[in-house]
Image (cartoon, grey):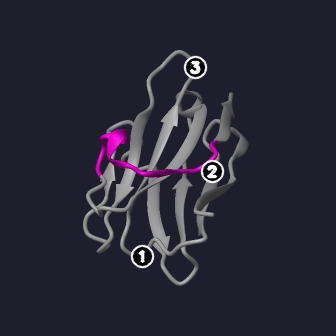
Amino acid sequence: EVQLVQSGGGEAQDGGSLTLSCAGVGFTFADLSLGWFRQAPGKEREAVSCISSDNGPSYYSDSVKGRFHISRDKAKNTVYLRMNSLRSEDTAVYYCAGDRHGIGGRPAHRYDYWGQGTQVTVSA
């Protein structure tokens, strides 16, 4: 069974750091474009960061640019999101996603595989 399995997340204080991980199970996502999305209560799902299959320039939303960092380890079949200088507005459920066509980018509809989601809560 093809799955994206997320780990990490949880609670952090304002200004703290967390790392999210997302492992591909049952397949290799070396040729996939990968992304991290988040959805806060009452808001639409938004793209946070994306990385292409060839490790080209990554995308970051304006709200996280300079604070978050996306990376992938092809040997471990895992993508990471390192989140620094966390703010209360970063509180959301975070999802990793994979696009088997290698296009990726911000539009969520391009992605074929989704992780189960993990809660990130930032408190003052």
Q: Splitting the image into 4 quarters, where does residue 91 fall?
A: top right
**Residues tagged 1 and 3 counted as in contact (Cβ below 8 A):** no
- Which residue is disc 3 drawn over? 41
Q: Disc 3 or 2, which lies upstream in sequence?
A: 2
Q: Residues within 10 Å of mark 2 (few under 14, many from 20)?
A: some
- Which residue is disc 2 drawn over? 17
**Residues tagged 3 and 2 counted as in contact (Cβ below 8 A):** no
Q: Left or right: where does residue 23 sit relative to residue 100?
A: right
Q: Secondary structure at mark 1?
A: loop
Q: For the residues carrying marks 1 and 3, which lies nearer the camera in this image?
A: 1
Amino acid identity at mark 3: Pro
Would residue 92 be counted in the magenta stretch? no
| Distance between mark 3 and mark 2 Cα atoms | 21 Å
Q: For the residues carrying marks 3 and 2, which lies nearer the camera in this image?
A: 3
**Mark number, residue 75:** none
Q: Residue at x 30, y 61 (%)?
A: 101
Q: Splitting the image into 4 quarters, where does residue 21 fall?
A: bottom right
Q: Left or right: where does residue 30 sit relative to residue 77?
A: left
Q: Secondary structure at mark 3?
A: loop
Q: Which residues are magenta?
A: 105-117
Residue 21 seen in the current view: no
Amino acid identity at mark 1: Ala
Q: Residues within 10 Å of mark 3 (few under 14, many from 20)?
A: few
* Residue toward you, 104 or 57: 104
| Distance between mark 1 and mark 3 Cα atoms | 32 Å
Q: For the residues carrying marks 1 and 2, which lies nearer the camera in this image?
A: 1
Label tally:
3
- Which residue is disc 1 drawn over? 30
Please provide percent x and percent y for residue 48: 41, 43
Amino acid identity at mark 2: Ser
**Residues tagged 1 and 2 counted as in contact (Cβ below 8 A):** no
Would residue 113 be counted in the magenta stretch? yes
